[in-house]
Amino acid sequence: MTKIKGRCLCGAISFEVANTFEKLFMCSCDQCRQITGSAFASNLFVSIEEFDWLKGADDVVNYQLPGRDISKSFCRVCGSGVPWSSDDGTKMIVPAGSLSEPAIVAERVRIFTSEQPSWASNLEQVPAHAEFPKLR
Ligand SMILES: [Zn+2]
Ligand SMILES: [Zn+2]
């Protein structure tokens, strides 16, 4: 089975995971907006046996929202989102943006679009630039 690597921005943490993802969930709920500081969280789920830390497992910090099945792991050095385990310990939840190579995903699903902020709607109508635009 092909494996791909992922890492945090500063490189303190890296991991390896089997590149066979059933689903990518793009979640626009209020908690994911807060936790990412962005429009939605993009999370892949894999069985825990298909995941290994390569470096920096001690630099992973986990935050658990009290009373809720919501958590977030991040690098203590650079704050990048990194994978964390599900409450029942059977799966790893991998932020898609933490992967360094293209992920093979069978299905993409958007969830909690009812809580999507208005500034993140109709993105196909927003001017797009290949790189940072020239400021006038
Ligand atoms: Zn880092
Ligand atoms: Zn969410």
Image (cartoon, grey):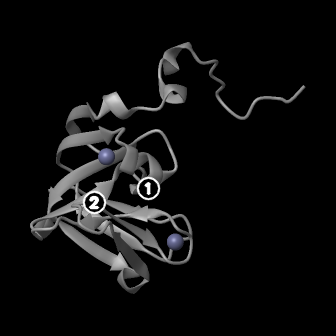
Q: Quick check: 123 above or below 45? A: above
SS for callout 2: loop
**C-alpha gap between disc 1 and disc 2:** 10 Å
Does the beta carbon of the residue at mark 1 sit less than 8 Å from ligand 2?
A: yes
1 and 2 marks in contact (CB < 8 Å): yes
SS for callout 1: helix
Residue furthest bottom as drawn? 58
Q: In the image, is 118 to the left or to the right of 50?
A: right
Q: In the image, is 134 to the left or to the right of 66?
A: right
Q: In the image, is 95 to the left or to the right of 51?
A: right
Residue 8: mark in rendering: none
Q: In the image, is 40 to the left or to the right of 132?
A: left
Residue type at tag 1: Ile
Q: Residue at x 49, y 63 (%)?
A: 80
Instruction: Residue 127: give x, y in percent of width and height.
Output: 64, 18
Instruction: Residue 91: give x, y in percent of width and height.
Output: 14, 63
Instruction: Residue 54: give x, y in percent of width and height.
Output: 33, 77
Residue furthest right as drawn? 136
Where the N terminus falls, by quadrant?
Answer: bottom left
Q: Nearer the viewer, residue 123 or 97?
A: 123
Q: Which residue matches tag 2?
A: 70
Say which label, 1 or 2, has the lower sequence index.
1
Residue type at tag 2: Ile
Q: Nearer the viewer, residue 34 or 94?
A: 34
Q: Residues within 10 Å of mark 2 (few under 14, many from 20)?
A: some
Q: Quick check: 106 above or below 52? A: above
Where the C terminus falls, by quadrant?
Answer: top right
Q: Which residue matches tag 1?
A: 35
